[in-house]
Amino acid sequence: QVQLVESGGGLVQAGDSLRLSCAASGRTLSSYTMAWFRQAPGKEREFRAAISWRGGSTYYADSVKGRFTISRDNAKNTVYLQMNSLKPEDTAVYYCAARLAAPRDFDNLYEYNYWGQGTQVTVSS
């Protein structure tokens, strides 16, 4: 069993940056594909970014390419999402997700078995 805890959310202004962290316990993350999703009120959970278990491959939603960077530190059992040039439309609860080995579709939330409780990101204009 993997427990995931997100942190780093907050209230920022448009153009600012935030770094989200996802700390795992219960298992080492080195064999897990990790991802970040977001969910705004009244909307479905959306893929933001994913990173392969070795960290050699990363995947991004088109709307965050060039602004967000996903990374992992397997020694610290932690995954990060660096978010730059934030926009008001980035406002949502951000969730960390994990899956043992590689999913068929990195952006499919149903491929992931473990989820954190989420951290709120609010970007004001």
Image (tube, rainbow, N blue to C red):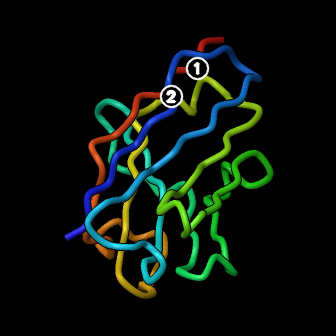
Q: Which image quadrant is residue 7 in?
A: top left
State whether residue 62 is above or below residue 63.
below
Q: Which residue is mark 1?
A: 123
Report whether 48 appears left or right of 38.
Answer: right
Secondary-structure class at tag 1: strand
Q: Which image quadrant is residue 93 in?
A: top left
Q: Which residue is mark 2?
A: 91
Count all numbered tags in the image, as a single digit. 2
Between the C-alphas of marks 1 and 2, the distance is 5 Å
- The residue shown at (80%, 52%) is 66
Query: Residue 2's mark?
Result: none
- The residue shown at (39%, 70%) is 108
Q: List x then y, in percent, for residue 5.
A: 34, 46
Q: Are marks 1 and 2 in contact (CB under 8 Å)?
A: yes
State whether residue 113 is above or below residue 105.
above
- The residue shown at (52%, 60%) is 76
Q: Mark 2 is on which residue type?
A: Thr
Secondary-structure class at tag 2: loop
Q: List x then y, in percent, for residue 2.
A: 26, 66
Q: List x then y, in percent, for residue 56.
A: 69, 81
